[in-house]
């Protein structure tokens, strides 16, 4: 679930980067390209480059890409502030305020997808379209074995991993690594549910991308898609505005490495 790869792609330099004030802390952002804004929210323990390094150059050809690093991740400093999806979603709003972005498309992977769902519930007027990659809005969206893993995770499991290497390359205070892990692991171990009724109220078009074996419970995923207006007999009635893509032969981490496939879905959906 939590391993990752370093991007071998041709990396492009951001046209802007910095820190935005947000709810008592600061959030690091990078900006690439120009056009309609799309905000990228990474997975747990990832950095911008680790999660999006291969996708950003493609998206930035036609879009203004704003990639954030959530509380304690990458360049964003560790904070003792309680880690909550509601606060992280509010951080995204504060970055938008700081960068004077009225509304944007939001793409979230894994943990970032949970924050993206929360943003859609809290700030519907700031959201244009939503893309959720291998993520859930409630604990039951994962298979039971994933939730079991969350309960037994320890900081030692991350020692000398690519995640630690990526963190230490950019973190403002490398001594916070263990505290950061403890904070994230504690959050992962707490069951959560944003509410079926809140998902059903999302008016923005939503694209969900899932790997066929990425740890998501596909029965729950079908229910989620139905809440968003999908799972109908289109042809007898209009095609729903939300979409579902299940990518074959993919696990949770491998899915994010399918740059060409994911970009193809994003490019057509985010028109």
Image: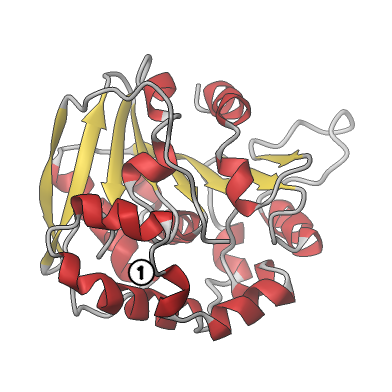
Front one among 95 and 1: 1
Q: Is residue 120 above or below residue 38?
A: below
Q: Is residue 81 above or below residue 135?
A: below
Residue at 26% x, 26% y is 32
Residue at 73% x, 57% y is 221
Position of 3 compared to 251: left or right? Answer: left
Quadrant, the N terminus? bottom right
Q: Is residue 95 above or below residue 25?
A: above
Q: Badge 1 local density, few (<14 within 10 Å), some, or many (20+)? A: some
**Residue 257 falls in image quadrant:** top right
Residue indicated by mark 1: 86
Q: Position of residue 50 (x, y in %)?
A: 39, 44
Front one among 246 and 271: 246
Position of 232 compared to 114: left or right? Answer: right
**Residue 65 falls in image quadrant:** top left
Q: Position of residue 111 (x, y in %)?
A: 47, 60
Q: Position of residue 195 (x, y in %)?
A: 57, 72
- Residue 207 in view here: no
Disc 1 element? helix
- Residue 120 in view here: yes
Q: Position of residue 72 (x, y in %)?
A: 25, 65
């Amino acid at each position: 679930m939590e391993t990752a790869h370093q991007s071998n792609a041709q990396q492009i330099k951001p046209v802007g980067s910095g820190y935005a004030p947000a709810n008592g802390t600061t959030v690091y952002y990078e900006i690439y390209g120009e056009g309609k804004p799309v905000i990228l929210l990474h997975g747990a323990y990832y950095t911008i480059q680790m999660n999006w390094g291969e996708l950003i150059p493609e998206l930035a050809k036609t879009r203004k890409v704003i990639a954030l690093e959530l509380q304690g991740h990458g360049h964003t400093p560790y904070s003792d502030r309680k880690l909550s999806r509601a606060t992280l979603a509010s951080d995204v709003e504060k970055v938008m305020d700081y960068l004077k972005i009225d509304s944007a498309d939001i793409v979230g992977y894994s943990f970032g997808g949970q924050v993206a769902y929360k943003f859609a519930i809290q700030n519907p007027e700031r959201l244009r379209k939503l893309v959720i990659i291998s993520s859930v809005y409630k604990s039951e969206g994962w298979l039971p074995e994933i939730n079991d893993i969350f309960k037994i995770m320890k900081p030692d499991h991350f020692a000398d991993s690519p995640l630690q290497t990526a963190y230490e390359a950019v973190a403002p205070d490398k001594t916070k690594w263990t505290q950061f892990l403890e904070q994230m692991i504690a959050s992962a171990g707490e069951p959560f549910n944003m509410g079926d009724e809140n998902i059903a109220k999302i008016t923005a078009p939503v694209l969900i991308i899932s790997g066929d074996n990425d740890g998501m419970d596909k029965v729950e995923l079908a229910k989620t898609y139905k809440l968003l207006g999908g799972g109908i007999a289109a042809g007898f009635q209009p095609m729903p505005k939300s979409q579902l893509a299940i990518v074959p032969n993919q696990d949770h981490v491998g899915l994010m490495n399918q740059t060409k496939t994911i970009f193809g879905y994003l490019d057509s959906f985010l028109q």
